Amino acid sequence: MRRKRIAVLFGGCSSEYEVSLQSAYAVAEHLDVEKYEVILIGIDKTGAWYLYQGAYADLPGDHWKRKETCIPAAVSPDKNLHGLLLLKETGVETLPLDAALPILHGKNGEDGTVQGALELAGIPVIGCNTMSSAICMDKETAHRLAHECGVKVPASYIITKAGLREKEQITAYGKALGYPLFVKPLRAGSSFGITRVGEPEALLKAVEYAFTYDSQVILEEMIEGFEVGCAVLGTEELTLGAVDEIELSEGFFDYTEKYTLKSSKIHVPARISQEQAQEIKETAVRIYRALGCSHFARVDLFLTPEGEIYFNEVNTIPGFTSHSRFPNMLKEAGISFEEILTRLLEMVCDAGV
């Protein structure tokens, strides 16, 4: 029986490029190679695509892009091929695919752009589709939909680049939200360009900083309490991981804290009651469904001292190393890293979708 050919996409034009390399390495190392043929597709920081044929071990340190191990590639527009064009020196060759698993974090990968290219090419995508990926990446749209299905969301205001000139209006937004507040790029993932603003004098500088990552910026009320997360696996029938909890001793859970845990800890399971954990899981499912998620995602929420649950965001391609939050929540629920990947591939390949 022919092995199904699965493309794992890594890298990308994103500030989270390096994290993608770590995640893709872990995924490639744990896929069942007896059942699946792993095709690694690297996207460099300029957006160029390559079929990577080198050692997996060269991914984490960003040593993968070498002429002898890379063949320039492009997504074929021919749906009958549902695959890639390999741009070799001897001519163009085709590489049909059974499915693609994007392991691309942040902008230009988690936002629906790559998913759209794959869907146009007739390549089944493992993960959230184009629309769901775009919705989840847009903080305002995601919050609106979560609110519509009865979930509390932080108060917020949107600023466009044209609105950047209206400094009095921005100041008024800050006053209405109260301090401290958060300033975030609207569609740039969850790690970069974010500032916790503790006083009015720092607001404009934080807004200008956020604009270096996106063309729109969101000012968001700070919710008292702590962040919790829930891993969701599946589309029709859902499997939930244990709820986790982020304990912070200072600041907020930014890029540095996510990958160094210098002043924070992640508790799996969260140090909350079973009733609260169940309510968080039910809220995560409601959001996952409302935002049209499929196959897998991590839903992040806030739990206040009063026990209220607020929506934070959905990561449609969460970190995928063996020590990342998403696999660790499912591990606590009895599902190994290898089993997560097998289930994901079976959802698409065995269904023939």
Image (cartoon, helix red, strand yellow):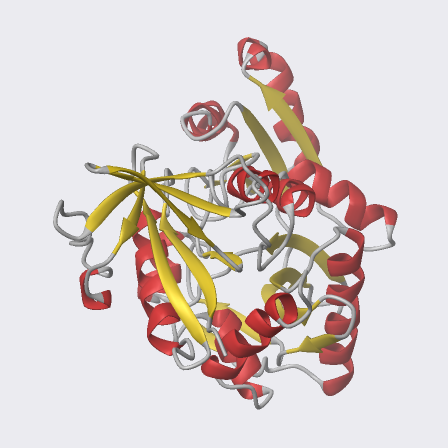
The residue at 33%/74% (across/down) is 29
Residue 175, position as x, y percentages in the image = 65, 29
Answer above or below: position of 130 versus 62. Answer: above
Q: Nearer the viewer, residue 342 or 270?
A: 342
Residue 214, position as x, y percentages in the image = 48, 28
Q: Quadrant of residue 300?
A: bottom right
Answer above or below: position of 274 versus 164. Answer: below
Q: Nearer the viewer, residue 27 or 106?
A: 27
Horizontal side of residue 107 vs 295, given as left or right:
left
Q: Quadrant of residue 279?
A: bottom right
Horizontal side of residue 345 vs 31, given as left or right:
right
Answer above or below: position of 137 versus 29. Answer: above
The residue at 65%/49% (across/down) is 129
Q: Nearer the viewer, residue 267 or 167?
A: 267
Residue 139, position as x, y percentages in the image = 64, 40
Horizontal side of residue 184 vs 139, given as left or right:
left
Total labels: the figure holds 0
Q: Is residue 225 visible?
A: no
The residue at 60%/32% (across/down) is 218
Q: Nearer the viewer, residue 34 or 114?
A: 34
Q: Is residue 316 visible?
A: yes
Residue 108, position as x, y percentages in the image = 46, 38
Image quadrant containing the C terminus: bottom right
Name of the residue lying farthest toward the bottom: 334
Q: Quadrant of residue 270?
A: bottom right
